[in-house]
Image (tube, rainbow, N blue to C red):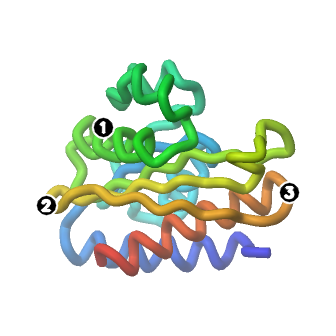
Amino acid sequence: MINDSELYARSARLGAALKRENTFITCAESCTGGWVAKTITDVSGSAGWFERGFVTYGNQAKIDLLGVRPKTLEQHGAVSDPVVLEMVSGALRAASADYAVAISGIAGPDGGTIEKPVGTVWFGFANADDEPFSQLMHFEGDREAVRRQAVHFALTTLLATFL
């Protein structure tokens, strides 16, 4: 299982890269409940690259805080490609950040379906210059394991893609 020190190390690398570039990151989180923001702010000095994040666990929060369209939620459900793309674009805009990540998934133990089993997590990634993109992942394990893997994947992908 991914441990706290691994998450901290990824976050510290991300923070160092953001600081070098004098850029800011934001996050819009559903199933991770603010864990990405917590991991980022575990690093001393993180106010220099992180000002705000959004925990949008419920659909109304996604609509109110990130501008996700109700029709998108109705047609695709919260755990979907179109929703995370709207989430990440909304977070980037609302935070006036340079980079953003959005996460929406089913961490379990309940909530899974045949089409979207427990461990299904959609990610949205964006920067201020390019079109946002998304990635679907399927994680194994209990609720905490799924969430840890989601945070790790988000930080790793941000580093690999943007910094």
Q: What distance separates the C-alpha of mark 2 from that of mark 3?
A: 37 Å
| Horizontal arrangement in the rendering, residue 158 relative to residue 92 (left or right) | right
**Identity, as a three-letter code, of the amino acid under mark 1:** Gly
Identify the residue at image location x=33%, y=27%.
67
User: Tag 3, which secondary structure?
Assistant: loop
- Indicate the amino acid at tag 3: Asp
Quarter of the picture containing the C terminus is: bottom left
| Apparent side of residue 29 relative to residue 115 in the rendered image (left or right) | left
Res. 52 image quadrant? top left
Residue 87 at x, y = what percent?
A: 39, 40
Front one among 147 and 105: 105
**Residue indicated by mark 3:** 142
Give the labeled residue for mark 1. 90
Judging by the rendered image, the residue that carries numbered circle 2 is: 129
Of mark 2 and mark 3, the one earlier in the sequence is 2
Is residue 39 positioned above or below 26 on the image? below
Spatial separation of the CA atoms under disc 2 and disc 1: 15 Å
**The residue positioned farthest toward the left in the image shown:** 129
Which sits earlier in the primary sequence, circle 3 or circle 1?
Answer: 1
Residue at 71% across, 64% down: 139
x and y percentages locating residue 78 in the rendered image: 55, 35
